[in-house]
Amino acid sequence: MKKIILVTALFLAGCNTSQPNLISNKFTVVMPDKSMFYCPTIDSLPKSNTLTDVEVAKTVVELYKDNKICKNSINQIQKFLKDSQAKITQP
């Protein structure tokens, strides 16, 4: 009977040892695609002293298009980062 109690006590003592930590946190940096960082710019504006109404209109349209493309790029980056954050925080 003493042997059974001794074996049981040793068995329980062996089960009571600390287990290695099986869970670890790994943080990663998520970088968006380079195409999302594209914001077109106008390299040179027409000379203001010889500017015609048509050239002003074309410049305004070009600036509007560039701004629209850049805004879409920024919105895509924000969406990408929010989606990545949601994937990382999911259990």
Image (spheres, rainbow, N blue to C red):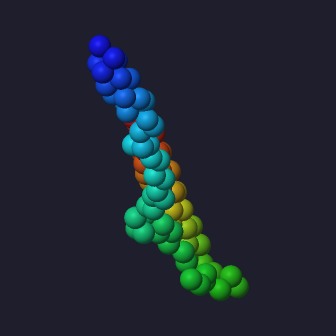
Q: Residue at x 46, y 56 (%)?
A: 28
Q: Which residue is drawn at 50% across and 72% down?
A: 40
Percent x, y for residue 65? 48, 64
Percent x, y for residue 73? 47, 59
Q: In which quarter of the image is residue 10?
A: top left
Q: Say left or right for 38 vs 2.
A: right
Query: Could one spot residue 69 in this view of the protein?
Result: no
Q: Which image quadrant: the C terminus?
A: top left
Query: Could one spot residue 40 in this view of the protein?
Result: yes
When the figure is inspected, residue 26 is found, relative to residue 21, above or below; the finding is below
Observer-nearest of 2 and 66: 2
Residue situated furthest top in the rendering: 1
When the figure is inspected, residue 80 is found, relative to residue 67, above or below; the finding is above
Q: Which image quadrant: the N terminus?
A: top left
Q: Residue at x 61, y 81 (%)?
A: 45
Observer-nearest of 42 and 71: 71
